[in-house]
């Protein structure tokens, strides 16, 4: 393991006031996003949209890393510059989603497991040559009365830890993303209970696999009531429950925690992160964002696939990045919206 290389990447990403842009939507996921604005999901549209994001003037003031999808790693801007090179020139670290999506977990009804470990080391070397310095792997945990089952907690934790160890072995910083899903009518208390159990399992597995906590990024979901729960919590309750769980389960040696937005509105995702920094609690880790939808949704809506909308779409993306940058220091106010 090249500790120096990993430490340099962590230092370039975990910067106060900055976060990560997740622009690694797989083809089926970007198809859904494009369908919402009636844009055909073809390779040129995917490339053009990513170019819009990455060439947004000033985005690097608030974005220190971008997660790319495999296809995007080899895409180029209109002037012929490969995207990883374009990002690196702005001081933004290029990263890559390396998991191959989820399948049902056998003998654990309702649960999923993430695939993609076979040949991962070789793939990482390849991605590294193309400029990637960090990676992402997402495991998902649906909540129901019986899910996630113990088998799903253990299996996903083991797979996440194997992935993280292989990344570090190859000089790539792993983003470990255990996402407790927001879908369903569960209460915030149930989400807290599940999130705590999930994270305990993940960190026990990371420890068993000798993953260096100092050289990894945790990308968790926030502790929040299910989308269709009749009892929705306020911003402060979400912030308190989330920090309570993280303080119980995440070693202080983890360099940075960057949340996913997971279907929250962009204002919610910003307000929640901000509130966590205003609790008056001393946090041992950098605490920031790694949002996809909460950074991109209004930008995508403005773009509509039309070249004449690129500039206003970039301005809206810049604004969301700026507001989340402020939230990651506890300096956001709703009046800034
Ligand atoms: P959202 O912020 O839209 O949840 O996406 C983050 C991500 O990278 C999911 O894997």
Image (cartoon, rainbow, N blue to C red):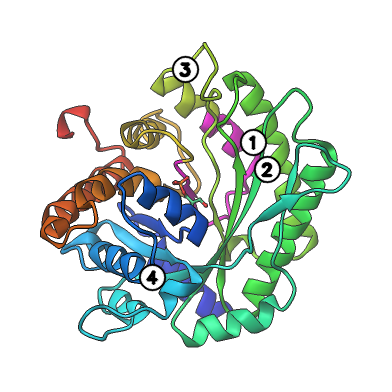
Image point (53%, 74%), residue name:
6
- On residue 163, the disc is none
Q: Determine which residue is flagged by label 4.
A: 43
Q: Residues within 10 Å of mark 2 (few under 14, many from 20)?
A: many
**In this view of the protein, which residue sits in the foreground, 30 or 208?**
30
- The part of the chain drawn in magenta is 242-261
Query: Which of pointers 3 and 1 indicates the residue nearer the eye?
Result: 3
Q: Earlier in the sequence, mark 1 or mark 2?
A: 2
The x, y position of residue 174, in whole percent, is: 58, 65
Q: Are marks 1 and 2 in contact (CB under 8 Å)?
A: yes
Q: Secondary structure at mark 3?
A: loop
Query: Which of pointers 3 and 2 indicates the residue nearer the eye?
Result: 3
Q: Earlier in the sequence, mark 4 or mark 3?
A: 4
- On residue 248, the disc is 1
Q: Secondary structure at mark 4?
A: helix
The quarter of the rendered structure image containing the N terminus is bottom right
The x, y position of residue 110, in whole percent, is: 76, 37
Alpha carbon distance from label 2 to label 4: 37 Å
Work out whether residue 2 can be spotted. no
Q: Earlier in the sequence, mark 3 or mark 1?
A: 3
Q: Determine which residue is flagged by label 3.
A: 233
> Which residue is most to the top?
230
Q: Determine which residue is flagged by label 2.
A: 199
Alpha carbon distance from label 3 to label 1: 21 Å
Work out whether residue 192 can be spotted. yes
Q: Secondary structure at mark 1?
A: helix
Q: Residues within 10 Å of mark 1 (few under 14, many from 20)?
A: few
User: Would you identify the image quadrant in which residue 216 lies?
Assistant: bottom right
């Amino acid at each position: 393991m090249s500790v120096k290389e990993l430490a340099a990447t962590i230092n370039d990403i975990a910067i106060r006031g900055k976060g990560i842009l997740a622009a690694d939507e797989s083809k089926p996921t970007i198809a859904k996003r494009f369908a919402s604005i009636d844009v055909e999901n073809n390779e040129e549209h995917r490339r053009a949209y990513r170019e819009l994001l990455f060439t947004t003037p000033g985005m690097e003031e608030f974005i220190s890393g971008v997660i790319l999808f495999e296809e995007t790693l080899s895409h180029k801007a209109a002037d012929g510059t490969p995207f990883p090179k374009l990002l690196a020139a702005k001081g933004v670290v290029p990263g890559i989603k390396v998991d191959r999506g989820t399948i049902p977990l056998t003998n654990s009804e309702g649960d999923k497991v993430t695939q993609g470990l076979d040949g991962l080391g070789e793939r990482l070397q390849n991605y590294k040559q193309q400029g990637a310095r960090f990676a992402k792997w997402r495991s998902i945990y649906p909540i129901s009365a019986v899910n996630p089952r113990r088998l799903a907690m253990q299996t996903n934790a083991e797979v996440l830890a194997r992935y993280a160890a292989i990344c570090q072995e190859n000089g790539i910083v792993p983003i470990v993303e255990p996402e407790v899903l927001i879908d369903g009518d569960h209460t915030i208390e149930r989400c807290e209970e599940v999130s705590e159990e999930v994270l305990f399992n993940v960190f026990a597995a990371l420890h068993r696999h000798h993953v260096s906590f100092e050289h990894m990024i945790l990308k968790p979901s926030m502790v929040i009531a299910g989308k269709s729960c009749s009892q929705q919590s306020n911003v402060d309750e979400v912030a308190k429950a989330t920090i309570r769980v993280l303080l119980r389960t995440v070693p202080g040696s983890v360099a940075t925690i960057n949340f996913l937005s997971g279907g929250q509105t962009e204002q919610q995702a910003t307000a929640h992160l901000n509130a966590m920094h205003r609790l008056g609690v001393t946090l041992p880790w950098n605490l920031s964002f790694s949002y996809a939808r909460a950074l991109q949704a209004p930008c995508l809506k403005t773009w509509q696939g039309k070249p004449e909308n690129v500039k206003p779409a970039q301005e809206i993306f810049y604004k969301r990045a700026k507001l989340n940058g402020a939230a990651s220091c506890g300096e956001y106010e709703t009046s800034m919206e």
